[in-house]
Image (cartoon, helix red, strand yellow):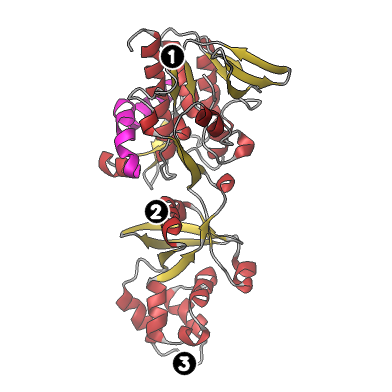
Amino acid sequence: MIGGGPAGLMAAEVLSHGGASVELYDAMPSVGRKFLMAGKGGLNLSHAEPAEPFLCRYGDRRRFVEPWLAAFGVDDLRKWVRELGIETYVGSSGRIFPTDMKAAPLLRAWLHRLRSSGVKFHARHRWLGWNDAGDARFATPHGEISTRADAVVLALGGGSWSKLGSDGAWVSVLEKAAVAVAPLRPANCGFEVAWSPFFRDKFAGQPVKSVAASFGGVTRRGEFVVTAHGVEGGLIYAFSAALRDAIEANGCADLEIDLLPDKAIEQVKIEVERPRGSRSLSSHLQSRLGLKGVKVGLLHESLTKDAFGVPPRLTSAVKALRLRLAAPRPLDEAISSAGGVRFDALDERLMLRAKPGVFCAGEMLDWEAPTGGYLLTGCFASGRAAGRGALDWLNGRR
């Protein structure tokens, strides 16, 4: 087992419980580092929305992900967590969390169970590929070693957060082995916006709350954060795949923001046109519509000084402000990555066609999902699928 993230640990669990002798290798000093970082603000394990919209979150990769989730879905995941001694709850947004919100207790309990089932861990072992005899090569603090296995599961992560181990170095290794790999691209990422120096200096780091965003015929509510380079945050991540693809195709993408989604355009129009006496327009907008701070700043960014004073133009901008996104932020800044081992390079058990006995799982596969528990659920489920595939291989069911 190579890679100690959620997918790798889950594959190791399936294999060890199936009677296999499991050796798990990871390049970092300890396993689960990205998992712990993802849970720093509250470990979002999954989401409680109905199956159909849940599956739609995987876009055009749904047909590959759906069998994983059919075998290990949201209810199965919650039961599995409970068996580790940790309860979960569904938040008001539908997201599923451990009751204490933390990743560390879950990981500790999981690692204890894995060690108790015989899984052996090898830290600071960076996978280098295979030698001429087909043995796995590792760089270690004491020099290079090689080891032979009856089956190998690769769960090496994507290409984001390289400091936590997901650096995409495996891509060239697999390509040399004639494995088709789609280029790694940022997913769940921020985007660049050409802010004015004034707006950037005044509002970078501030959240834009209680808004709605629309792109490609889809509208979602939430919030995002203004950064020195552009925008990021949950609402942006929900559209990141579509925005990234549109930018690649057209050179830019316009995300539409409704600054007041709870008010109809007619209500906004009435308040914007209401006589304001001696008050400034900014004071009027704050008093009548609750618009202030970064939201008013965004209006000034999208309208000229003259247009800001024209009621129809201002009303339109409040309800449909256009943010022109120039480029996604770099891959290493992204929460996750798209691209990876192509599904046509794998059989239905997630075994490489070019390397019999070698299986792949997790984020290194060519799929993506938004934050909100969808990505993590898919990683868990793909790890179980690869583990079952490897177990079948070991048991001669080929």
Which stretch is magenta? 58-83
Is 73 on the left or on the right of 8, as rendered? Answer: left
The part of the image, by quadrant, that contains residue 29 is: top right
The earlier-in-sequence mark between 3 and 2 is 2
Marks 3, 2: nearer the viewer: 2
Residue 96 seen in the current view: no
Foreground pick, 100 / 58: 58
Residue 112: x and y in percent read 54, 17
Is 23 on the left or on the right of 98, as rendered? Answer: right
Q: Which residue is found at the position 38% from the left and 86% from the top?
A: 273
- Tag 1 near tag 2, CB within 8 Å: no
The part of the image, by quadrant, that contains residue 91 is: top left
- Inspect the magenta stretch and tell me whether residue 59 lies in it: yes
Specify the label residue 242 is tagged with. 2
Quote the CA–CA distance across marks 3 and 2: 45 Å
Q: Secondary structure at mark 3?
A: loop
Q: Secondary structure at mark 1?
A: helix
Three-letter amino acid code of the residue under disc 1: Leu
Q: Which residue is mark 1?
A: 15
- Tag 3 near tag 1, CB within 8 Å: no
Three-letter amino acid code of the residue under disc 3: Gly
Is 142 on the left or on the right of 188, as rendered? Answer: right
- Tag 3 near tag 2, CB within 8 Å: no
Marks 3, 1: nearer the viewer: 1
Q: Which residue is mark 3?
A: 277
Q: Secondary structure at mark 2?
A: helix
Look at the magenta stretch and give its main secondary structure: helix
Residue 282 seen in the current view: yes
In which quadrant will I find the C terminus?
top left
Q: Which residue is found at the position 32% from the left and 75% from the top?
A: 265
Foreground pick, 166 / 396: 396
